[in-house]
Structures are given as structure tokens and as C-alpha cells.
Amino acid sequence: MTAIHVCSLTKLEETVTLTGARHVITLINAGTPMRLPATIGHDRHLFLAMHDIVDTVDGMTPPGETHVAQMLDWVQDWDRTTPLVVHCFAGISRSTAAAFTLVAALNPWRDEAALAALLRQRAPSATPNRRIVEIADRLLGRDGRMISAIEAIGRGADAFEGTPFALELEAPRQRND
């Protein structure tokens, strides 16, 4: 079963190596020093420059509709034969919101509340960026269910850095008609 792995910037190389991932999504501030693992080609890397904020702040780039739409579009080209790694600086907010969004997009039949509960189980420190989730909820037509699900799990445990984790994608459901 293919999975989306989430980690911090400091765990990127290790996570890519351990999982065999060949695709990476980066959600960090523009100008943050980083190096892609050698096994990840630039054609298999999506870099989204944004700060981990919810409200607009002068001099900072909040997550925007363009970021989320670009991520949703880019993931459609991922062949799912190898895992995908999503990371931000700490592996707590932007990357957990992105993983939640991507699983919801790629498995549209999955229940948002159950997915958020699984996220909390796998990542006790996860505090998904609300702005990313709100935009994704609107773009995916989830009628507030993604927002409600993340609100229900609440803020994660305090941590400087999240522990790497994975959310598995389910195989497409077959229609019985």
C-alpha cells in the first residue's frame, strides 16, 4: 500500500532513504537552506514557499489558494508506485495539513473525522495549519468537514520537532452496481 510520509526538514534525507520515496513536497519559508536527497530529481520535487501562519502578517507569505491548488494538481502526476514525502521545517503544521489534504484528495471517499483521528494517533504533536485545511476543504468541496475534523482533534502535544509518520492511501473502491 502506498503512503504519504511526513517529516521535518532535518529528517528529510533519512525519511526518503528509509521509505524509498522518489517524490517530495516541501512547504517552507523562501530562503530556508535545504538540500534535496540525491535520489530525488527536481522534476519530482514541489517547493511551496510559505510561512507557517494563519493570518496575514506584513513581510510574510501565508499559505494561499495558489499553493494548495498547485499541490493538488502536482500530486495527480505522482504514480503512487513509491511513497511520497511531505515535509516542512518542523514536521508539525504545514506538512501535516498537506498530508491530510492529499489523502483526502486522493481518497475522496474517506471520512474526514476518521482521517483526522488517524493523523492524531500517528502524530501526537500534529497541529495542521488551519489556513491550508480551510483552503483545501473549499477546493475539494468538503463543506467544512475537513475543518471540523481538524478542530475536533485539537492542538497537538508541544514539540520542537514532529516524529516522522505515514498515512496510507487506500486502494480505489469498486462500485457494486
Image (cartoon, rainbow, N blue to C red):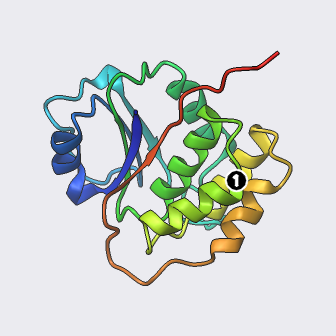
* In the displayed structure image, the side of residue 45 where residue 107 appears, left or right: right
Taking 45 as reference, is 51 above or below it?
below
* In the displayed structure image, the side of residue 171 where residue 107 appears, left or right: right
Front residue of this view, candidates 175 and 41: 175
| The C terminus - image quarter | top right
Image position, residue 38 (x, y; %):
13, 31
Res 55 visible: no
Image position, residue 117 (x, y; %):
59, 64
Identify which residue is drawn at 43% across, 18% down. 79
* In the displayed structure image, the side of residue 43 where residue 98 appears, left or right: right
Circle 1 sits on which residue?
112
Taking 148 as reference, is 109 above or below it?
above
Image position, residue 71 (x, y; %):
54, 35
Image position, residue 22 (x, y; %):
27, 28
User: Which quarter of the picture shows residue 7?
Assistant: bottom left
Front residue of this view, candidates 48 and 112: 112
